[in-house]
């Protein structure tokens, strides 16, 4: 779980200190008495990300939250939706696009949630990517992650049943 130490005579960072440093970056109000060096924290973070630790952890939290509500561990249905957002000027033009319906230059965040609203997957694309194309990607990633679910709810655009202006096709 811990990355191999990079040569040198420095003392090894404790995993708990690195975890506190990662949490401190997200919520600075949390106490972090011993922050390791930035490079050490990033090395651990990258190793944990590559090993799938964060997906495993969020999956565990989701299953615990579902159990607390008296639900099964894995969802039987999911909800897909997207939102067009303006992106910082620092993002390259290649990563941006113009949303067809709202004429917003920026990006889209596509979400897949279970019915209580717990996050299953997030996909960030250029605003020019259609909801149908992104919805297909979301569904395949949800299935690949083993979240199952036979029922899917989405708006008509994500389901591929409307034109570019949101009018329903017959």
Image (cartoon, helix red, strand yellow):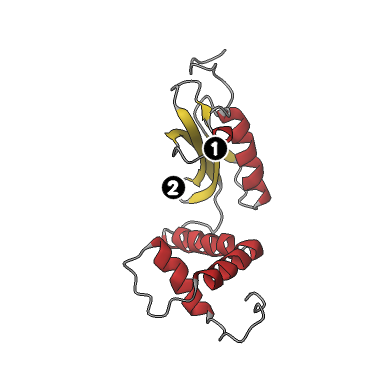
Circles 1, 2 touching at the beta carbon (< 8 Å): no
What is the spatial separation of the Cα atoms under label 1 and label 2, in whole angstroms? Answer: 32 Å
Give the percent coordinates (x, y) of residue 38.
50, 69
Q: Residue furthest top?
A: 170
Quadrant where the N terminus sits is bottom right
Q: Residue at x 66, y 42 (%)?
A: 140
Helix, strand or loop at mark 1: loop
Q: Nearer the viewer, residue 108 or 158?
A: 108
Quadrant where the C terminus sits is top right
* Vertical arrangement, residue 141 with respect to residue 24, above or below: above
Helix, strand or loop at mark 2: loop
Give the percent coordinates (x, y) of residue 146.
65, 53
Instruction: Classify residue 47 by image quadrant.
Output: bottom right
Q: How many marks?
A: 2
Give the percent coordinates (x, y) of residue 150.
61, 42
Q: Nearer the viewer, residue 43 or 122?
A: 43
Q: Residue furthest front?
A: 8
Q: Which residue is mark 2?
A: 117
* Vertical arrangement, residue 32 with respect to residue 54, above or below: below
Q: Residue furthest left?
A: 29
Label 2 CA crowd tier, 10 Å (few <14, some 14–19, many 20+): few
**First along the sequence among labels 1 and 2:** 1
Q: Which mark is residue 130?
A: none
Q: Residue at x 49, y 15 (%)?
A: 167
Q: Residue at x 50, y 34 (%)?
A: 107
- Left or right side of 134 for 102: left
Q: Residue at x 44, y 47 (%)?
A: 117
Q: Which residue is mark 1?
A: 92
Judged by depth in the image, the label closer to the viewer, 1 or 2, is 1
Instruction: Classify residue 27 by image quadrant.
Output: bottom left
Label 1 CA crowd tier, 10 Å (few <14, some 14–19, many 20+): few
* Vertical arrangement, residue 11 with respect to residue 126, above or below: below
């Amino acid at each position: 779980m811990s990355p191999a130490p990079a040569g040198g005579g420095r003392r090894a960072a404790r995993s708990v200190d690195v975890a506190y440093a990662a949490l401190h970056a997200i919520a600075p109000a949390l106490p972090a008495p011993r922050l390791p060096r930035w490079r050490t924290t990033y090395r651990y973070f990258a190793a944990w990300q590559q090993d799938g630790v964060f997906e495993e952890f969020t999956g565990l939290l989701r299953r615990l939250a579902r159990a607390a509500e008296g639900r099964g561990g894995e969802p039987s249905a999911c909800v897909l939706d997207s939102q067009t957002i303006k992106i910082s000027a620092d993002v390259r033009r290649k990563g941006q696009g113009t949303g067809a319906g709202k004429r917003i230059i920026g990006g889209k965040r596509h979400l897949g949630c279970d019915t209580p609203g717990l996050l299953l997957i997030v996909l960030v694309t250029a605003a020019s990517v259609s909801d149908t194309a992104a919805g297909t990607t979301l569904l395949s990633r949800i299935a690949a992650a083993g979240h199952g679910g036979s029922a899917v709810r989405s708006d008509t655009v994500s389901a591929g049943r409307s034109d570019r202006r949101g009018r329903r096709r017959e």
